[in-house]
Amino acid sequence: MSETVEPATARRNPLRLPVILAVAAALLAAGSGWWWYAAAEDDGVKFAELREQVRGAGERAVAEFNSLDYRRVDEGMRRWLETSTGALHEELRNTGASSKKQIEETKTVTTGRVTDAAVTELDDRAGKAKLIAAVEIEVAPDGAAATTKRNRFQAELTRTETGWKLSGLGPVPVAAS
C-alpha cells in the first residue's frame, strides 16, 4: 500500500503570514504612538516651549520700550504701561507727566528692532525670567537724517494673568578690552 505525502506548503495555514504581519504592524503602531505621546508630555519639551514663549514676549516688549514717536507720546506711554508690570510699571506711571514733556521737546521718533535675544534665566514656578537682547534703534530727529544705534539690554520679565510682561530693563555695559 502506498501512502500519499502532502507537500509541506499544503499543510501550512495560508492566513499565518498575513496575521503575523498585521500583529507586527499593530505593535509597531502602538510603540510609535507611545513614543510620540511620551515625547509630547516630556518636561523638557514643555520647558523649551515656555522659553520660546518668554523669548517672544521679551523681544516684543524690549522693541516696544525702544520705540516712541514724539507726536504720539500718550499712545506710546500707554503701550509701555500695558507691556510692563511691577516696579517698572509704577515708575512709568509716576514719571509720566515729566517724561512726556521732555519727549515732546526732543521731537524725535525712535524705532527699536530686536536683532537677537536669548533667555538667560527662567523660573517657571516663580514666574520670573531674564533675557538679553541686541537692539537696533533708528533715531529720527525732526528735520534731520535718521541714525541707527545698537544697544544691548537685559530685561526682567514676570508672568501676569495676561501673559509675560517687562518688570525691569537696563543696558548691558560693554566691558573694556
Image: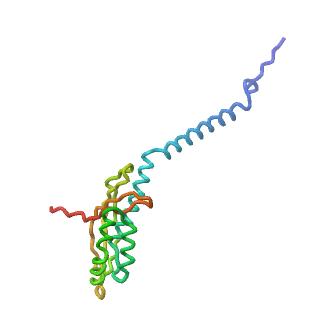
**Residue at x 64%, y 34% (from the top left corner):** 23
The vertical placement of 116 against 96, above or below, is above
* Frontmost residue, 78 versus 47: 78
Farthest residue, direction left = 177
Q: Position of residue 52 (x, y in %)?
A: 41, 57
Q: Quadrant of residue 107?
A: bottom left
Residue 12 in the image: x percent, y percent? 73, 26
- Residue at the outermost right position: 1
Compared across the picture, whether 16 is left or right of 40 comes to right
Which of the 4 image quadrants contains residue 25? top right
Name the image quarter holding the N terminus. top right
Q: Residue at x 39, y 54 (%)?
A: 51
| Residue 101 lies in quadrant | bottom left
Image spot of residue 33 (x, y percent): 56, 42
**Which quadrant is home to the C terminus?**
bottom left
Measuring from the top left, give residue 99's x and y in whole percent: 28, 76
Q: Is residue 159 left or right of residue 99?
A: right
Q: Is residue 94 above or below residue 19?
A: below
Q: Residue at x 66, y 37 (%)?
A: 22
Colour setting: rainbow
Q: Residue at x 77, y 22 (%)?
A: 6
Query: Farthest top residue?
Result: 1
Residue in the foreground of this view, choosing between 127 and 148: 127
